[in-house]
Amino acid sequence: MPELPEVETIRRQLEPAITGRVIEAVRVIDERWTRPVAPVEVERALAGHRIEAVERRGKYLLLRLEGDRTLAMHLRMTGNLLLQEPGSDPPHLRASFELDDGSRLLFTDARRFGQAVVLDGDGVDEYFAARLGVEPLSEALTGAELCRLASGRRAPLKSFLLNQTGVAGIGNIYADEALHRAALHPLSPAGSMKPEDCERLRDGIVATLEAGLRTGGASVDDYRDARGERGAMQDEFLVHTREGEPCPRCGSEIRRVVVAGRSTYFCPSCQRRLRRRPRRRARKRSPA
Ligand SMILES: [Zn+2]
């Protein structure tokens, strides 16, 4: 599933190519892509508008259009955004944009979980305020902020990182890799982190996402960039999908467990399992 580095890779490719272009026509082929809004309404809302900027929030890609209008797209599991010259349609095409320089922006999606929504004015901020937390590659992500977000949370660290309303943009791959870099066990309760653990986790998140950007993202399954090419992050995984292989830090065997329904890979030797903070025990209810 595309995460922050994959979406940001696409954004960086699209930005110089489509900024300033006018969307001449939009064709929504799959009504699920715009649900609950009818495809024809979305087609009309976008056609004729100039693209002023290409931005990203969490795992969402945003086309900022003239007239304070925004198209927010989420790739979900198997969505891809491809920039192509005119030609035949690729498989699993869900929507297409014809631009005024003759190029086409195509949204393909085999599993059909990808989504698009048109937002006007302040609607953008409201939409994301309810869905996304801090951007991990911004100055807003600090060790102290991570500790504040995790405070009192009993959820495992893996689930804490997958929750988009805490830190935005991290999914299954980058959560495993960040926790290994931070030497933290994925099943440790999030609220058990001490300040030094939060600092290491912050550094682990940033280093992991930067590795993803440097390698053009991870192409474990369907992900392709805007040019249709694979990323190479999967060749640099430290633990993700490496069950049974030696840990690159200590040599112990990498294990796999399921957390929140997701395969989770970690080293049981050097990723330390944290205990709950002592104050939790004081709150324990006495038996009735
Ligand atoms: Zn290890």
Image: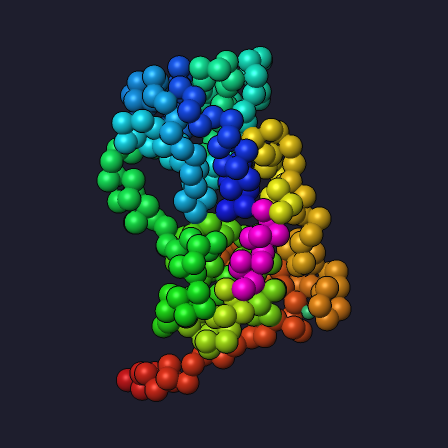
Location of residue 191 by image quarter: bottom left
Quarter of the image for the N terminus: give it: top right
Picture quarter with ligand 1: bottom right
Q: Residue at the spot x=40%, y=19% of the render?
A: 22
User: What segment is highlighted magenta in the picture?
Assistant: 203-213
Q: Residue at the spot x=34%, y=83% of the render?
A: 284
Q: Main secondary structure of the magenta part?
A: helix
Foreground residue, 52 or 85?
52
Foreground residue, 52 or 224?
52
Where 22 sits versus 36, above or below? above
Where 27 sits versus 180, above or below? above
Q: Position of residue 127 (x, y in %)?
A: 29, 43
What is the basis of the colouring in this image? rainbow
Q: Position of residue 207 (x, y in %)?
A: 58, 58
Foreground residue, 187 or 216?
216
Location of residue 177 by image quarter: bottom right
Query: Residue at the left extreme?
Result: 122
Q: Position of residue 34 (x, y in %)?
A: 36, 28
Quarter of the image for the C terminus: give it: bottom left
Residue 123 at least partly seen? yes
Residue 73 at least partly seen? no
Q: Residue at the spot x=36%, y=72% of the render?
A: 152
Where 7 sits versus 240, above or below? above
Q: Residue at the spot x=53%, y=59% of the render?
A: 205
- Does residue 101 appear to the left or right of 165 in the view shown? right
Q: Does 102 appear in magenta?
A: no
Foreground residue, 28 or 155?
28
- Does residue 284 appear to the left or right of 16 in the view shown? left
Q: Does 206 appear in magenta?
A: yes
Q: Position of residue 13 (x, y in %)?
A: 54, 33
Where 43 sits versus 128, above or below? above
